[in-house]
Amino acid sequence: MKENEKEITNYFNEIMRIKNICYPNQGQLDTVIGTRHYINNHYDKELNLNFLSHIRFTSKFHLLRLFKRYYGLTPKQHLIDRRLEKSKELLASGQSITETCFDIGFESPSSFSTLFKSKFGLTPSEFQKRATFTKSNNI
Amino acid sequence: MKVKVISIPVQDQEKALKFYTEKLGFLKKVDIPLSEGNRWLTVVSKEEPDGAEILLEPSPNHFEPAKVYQNALFDAGIPYTQFNCENVQQEYERLTSLGVEFSVKPTEMGTVKIAVFNDTCGNQIQIVQML
């Protein structure tokens, strides 16, 4: 046995076996990963399935099915998650709630607040107060 | 119910604290002395100090089946748990430069990239990046 073969664990072999079963189609992977990257980099823009499928040269229903299959959620759900995660950074840095709302691509501060609370369990202003308090305690 | 604490079995709590803070970059959160030199010792992510705490639990030293289970996972290279990061390749390079040993180098697995390292306290730990 060669020296480098000794270092390969059972876990690595198992990962490779499962990879070949679950991810044989590199074209599909490129499509969903490309879509996810696009959403991550353009979350502040108005994005919809028509547009996302157009830039990946595929049909919107096919893209929706693929994205959900590989990531377990729809492109729209991922977009909302990405926007809300980004909003936490902006709020923690002291930016106002209204400004944050528009910066991440939401149109209404009230729907932003409702979504934020449903995901994180507290309103944007409660989150901001807590983040400011934690920061001042760590100084 | 809330997820507040998850535990990782460690063979030496002090050594684990050093590894998880000095190498991985976690912060010590709670350190309460218990009987016979054991501690209720938790760390949190620096990026998410209000997130779930990791309890560095000395179970392998006090409960033989925990030790057997930990050793069996380690020998097969199976991670005890996993942490998310933004960039597995960068984290791999940073940790390698600090002397951390990897049993799985950065590897793409469908929609994720993973790598697995030895935490020097009896566990393989996986880092994951969503692609």
Image (cartoon, coloured by chain):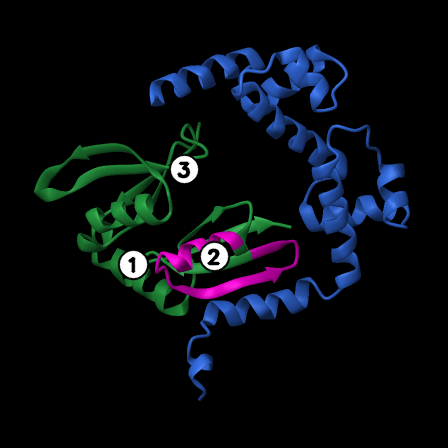
Chain colours: A blue, B green
Residue B52 drawn above or below residue B21: above
Q: Chain of mark 1?
A: B
Split into 4 quadrants, where in the image is the N terminus of chain A?
A: bottom left
Looking at the rendered structure, the secondary structure element under dot 3 is: loop
Residue A74 image-quadrant placement: top right
Cβ–Cβ under 8 Å for marks 3 and 1: no
- Disc number lying in front (2 or 3): 2
- Residue under disc 2 on the same chain as residue under disc 3: yes
Mark 3–mark 1 distance (CA, rounded to whole Å): 19 Å
Q: Position of residue B33 (x, y in %)?
A: 14, 35
The residue sitting at 56% across, 19% down in the picture is A91
Find disc 2 in the rendering and name its residue: B92
Give the magenta part as a residue range. B90-113
Looking at the rendered structure, the secondary structure element under dot 2 is: helix
Residue B24 drawn above or below residue B28: below
Q: Pick whichever of labels 3 and 1 is earlier in the sequence.
A: 3
B105 within the magenta span: yes
**Callout 1 crowding tier (Cα within 10 Å): few <14, some 14–19, many ≥20:** some
Q: Which mark is residue A17?
A: none
Q: Pick whichever of labels 2 and 3 is earlier in the sequence.
A: 3
Q: Amino acid type of disc 2?
A: Tyr
**Callout 2 crowding tier (Cα within 10 Å): few <14, some 14–19, many ≥20:** many
Q: Position of residue A41 (x, y in %)?
A: 72, 38
- Residue under disc 3 on the same chain as residue under disc 1: yes
Q: Pick whichever of labels 1 and 2 is earlier in the sequence.
A: 2
For this rendering, which residue is in front, A44 or A74?
A44
Find disc 1 in the rendering and name its residue: B120
Find disc 3 in the rendering and name its residue: B45
Looking at the rendered structure, the secondary structure element under dot 1 is: loop
Split into 4 quadrants, where in the image is the C terminus of chain A?
A: top left
Q: Amino acid type of disc 3?
A: Ser
